[in-house]
Image: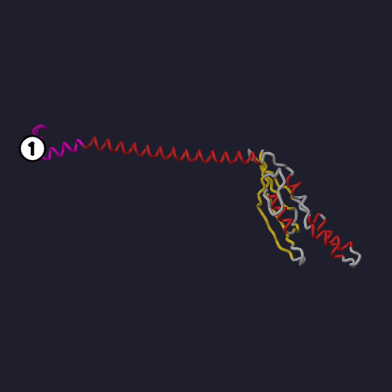
Amino acid sequence: MELSERLKTIPKSRLILYILGLGLIPLLGAAYLFMSKLEELNDLHNSLQGLKALSIQREKKQAGNIALRNYYREANHFYIDKNIENIRLLQPEIEGLKKAISNPNFPEDPNIRKRLEVLTGPQNHISFSEGAVQSNPFFQETLESLVHPVEININDLQKILSAVEGVEIGPYSPEPGRPQLIIIDFKLDKKSLSDKNEVFGLNMKLLKREFL
């Protein structure tokens, strides 16, 4: 049976449905292709947005690094030596001990003299030891550790923290030329040595970062 004759045997209503179905195939294909391309376009847009956000984040980070390098450009390599290690500790107690020793009305007390020798000697002097230097493309880092704990009072603590943090604390202000100093270990223990003088034991480690 020829095709024309077969078509004659198909009811017109069904034939119309077949024709409509065949006509929808290109439309469905076009719609599928359009949706696929639209999804690809959305993926591309999302990728571009992600790259843009990453680029902005990198630019901000780079700008922050540049500002940080510029801020510490004139840092003094010997800042710790000059401005922290030279802090004289427990000066009120030292002056009181000296007066007690020089006062002829009081008998000689070996404990007072021994205490004075401790406070004025190297045992209670701030001294940092430098660890290995870690070099990076834009800066170098050095671990600075106290050689031994020291005894301090509240005023000494304010001086030290002001010099380390680079901010005003109480009546004390930091000296210029400070490198970036980061406290990585800090231990403060209260000692009951005197009713009049509040004394603490201090031990600490610093990370010194110098920009090249």
Vertical order, 13 against 174 (above or below): above
Q: Is residue 15 magenta?
A: yes
Which class describes the residues within 10 Å of circle 1: few (<14), some (14-19), or many (20+)?
few
Which residue type does callout 1 highlight? Thr
Vertical order, 64 against 104 (above or below): above
Residue 95: image location, x then y, percent: 83, 59
Tell me, what colour scheme is on the image?
Answer: secondary structure
Q: Is residue 26 magenta?
A: no
Vertical order, 20 against 124 (above or below): above
Q: Is 83 situated left or right of 23 in this image?
A: right
Q: Read off the residue under disc 1.
A: 9
Per the rendered image, the range of residues in magenta is 1-23
Where disc 1 sits, the SS reads: helix
Residue 152: image location, x then y, percent: 75, 58
Q: Is 153 situated left or right of 63 in this image?
A: right
Residue 157: image location, x then y, percent: 71, 56
